[in-house]
Image: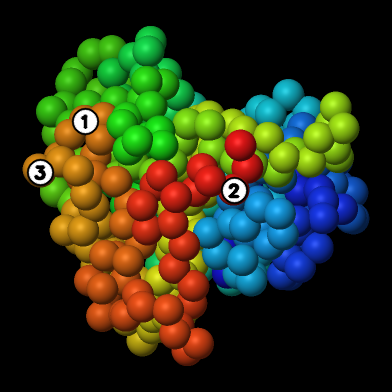
């Protein structure tokens, strides 16, 4: 079960007609029925679960949608934190956060940031959390954005169709610093930021409400990369339900294992690079590391786009 915290979802889009939407909550306007008045959320849900003219990473995955951002595509920490709490209450296995901002301060192991504290609570409950590295690569502020900067969050940067780092993808600061505030402690493997990269430039996406008469388009940003990783995790957890938060191997052990597998199987660099992470996502290799066959099989989930370039063929 993937919980997408974003601007909502346009369930009227033809490519989401088969979406398995199991719950919806509007933290902005308290409307009972799903909608998306900005478009970002629909694009991210489509990357994960579209099943039509555009096919997502994990069509058929159970989806929860928490609308926590408004028409400007922004949300405050308290609202976002409440949405993350709801995801946990609704038994999400994965929380997908295609968003980011400045970090809070840690006071006696508690963050001053409501979103960061809710994310940490979700991680402590054994829920996987993915988050965007950020899009300030060309105006680098020195680290990935929060909550992607939290140790156990899987932070995702972006690459283009040639598996080259997208210029806007934020760089991690893994050596530590005192200034500018807040200070950053040095990070060690497998928790260096970002953990990996996935498609993030000119990614085919759904357009909500047929804006400008269009149903499909392209978008760039580590938001899309994050949705890609969330879909990959859904495939993994479908094949290995014991890694789900209530599974026999779930909890912190599962999070640690998956992060180790990401370090071992991501492709393209040796060691860790502050932009490229441990490498680019390879869903087949991730499944193999988890002891799951990635060969097409009716008893196994579909494994799409093993090479990042493959996803760009559908909508040009």
Of 114 and 177, the residue lying toward us = 177
Task: Quote the CA–CA distance across marks 3 and 1.
Answer: 10 Å
Rate crowding at label 2 as few (under 14), some (14 to 19) or many (20 or more) other CA atoms within 10 Å.
few
| Residue under pointer 1 | 274
Write down the residue under mark 2.
Answer: 314
Give the crowd class for mark 3: few <14, some 14-19, many >=20 residues within 10 Å.
Answer: few
Q: Which quadrant would the N terminus be assigned to in this image?
A: bottom right
Which residue shows up at 38% across the image and 10% down it? Answer: 139
Q: Which residue is drawn at 14% across and 48% down?
A: 189
Residue that carries the numbered disc 3 in the rendered image: 271
195 relative to 243, above or below: above
Q: Which of marks 2 and 3 is nearer the N terminus?
A: 3
SS category of the residue bearing label 1: loop
Mark-to-mark CA distance, 2 and 3: 33 Å
Labelled disc at residue 198:
none
Disc 1 to disc 2, C-alpha distance:
31 Å
What x and y, as percent, mark residue 116? 46, 41
What residue is drawn where x is 39% and y is 47%?
Answer: 308
Whether residue 84 appears in this view of the structure is no
Circle 1 packing at 10 Å, graded few (<14), some (14-19), many (20+), is many
- Badge 1 or badge 2: first in the primary sequence: 1
Vertical relation: 182 (above or below) 261: above
Classify residue 190 as left or right of residue 306. Answer: left
Examine the rendered structure and indicate whether residue 215 appears above or below residue 258: above
Splitting the image into 4 quarters, where does residue 291 fall?
Answer: bottom left
Q: Where is residue 157 in the image (x, y as percent from the top left)?
A: 37, 36
Q: In which quarter of the image is residue 158?
A: top left
Label 2: state its secondary structure: loop
Which secondary structure, mark 3?
Answer: loop
Whether the residues at callouts 2 and 3 have beta carbons within 8 Å, the answer is no
């Amino acid at each position: 079960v993937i919980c997408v915290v974003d601007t909502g979802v346009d369930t009227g889009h033809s490519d989401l007609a088969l979406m398995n939407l199991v719950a919806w909550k509007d933290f902005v306007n308290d409307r009972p029925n799903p909608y998306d008045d900005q478009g970002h959320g629909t694009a991210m849900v489509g990357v994960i679960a579209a099943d039509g003219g555009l096919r997502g990473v994990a069509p058929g995955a159970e989806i929860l949608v928490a609308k926590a951002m408004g028409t400007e595509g922004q949300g405050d920490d308290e609202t976002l934190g409440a949405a993350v709490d709801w995801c946990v209450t609704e038994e999400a296995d994965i929380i997908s956060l295609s968003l980011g901002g400045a970090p809070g301060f840690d006071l006696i192991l508690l963050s001053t940031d409501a979103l960061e504290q809710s994310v940490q609570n979700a991680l402590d409950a054994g829920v996987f959390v993915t988050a965007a590295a950020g899009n300030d690569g060309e105006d680098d502020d020195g680290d990935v954005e929060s909550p992607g900067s939290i140790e156990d969050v899987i932070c995702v940067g972006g690459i283009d169709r040639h598996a080259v780092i997208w210029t806007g993808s934020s760089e991690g600061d893994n050596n530590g610093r005192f200034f500018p505030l807040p200070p950053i402690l040095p990070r060690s493997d497998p928790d260096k930021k970002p953990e990996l990269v996935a498609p993030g430039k000119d990614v085919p996406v759904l357009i909500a409400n047929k804006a400008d008469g269009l149903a499909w388009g392209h978008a760039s940003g580590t938001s899309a990369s994050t949705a890609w990783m969330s879909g990959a995790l859904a495939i993994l957890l479908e094949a290995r339900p014991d890694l789900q938060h209530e599974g026999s191997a779930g909890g912190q052990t599962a999070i640690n294992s998956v992060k180790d597998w990401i370090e071992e199987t991501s492709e393209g660099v040796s060691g860790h690079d502050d932009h490229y992470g441990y490498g680019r996502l390879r869903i087949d290799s991730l499944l193999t590391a988890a002891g799951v066959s990635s060969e097409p099989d009716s008893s196994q989930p579909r494994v799409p786009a093993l090479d990042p370039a493959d996803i760009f063929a559908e909508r040009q």
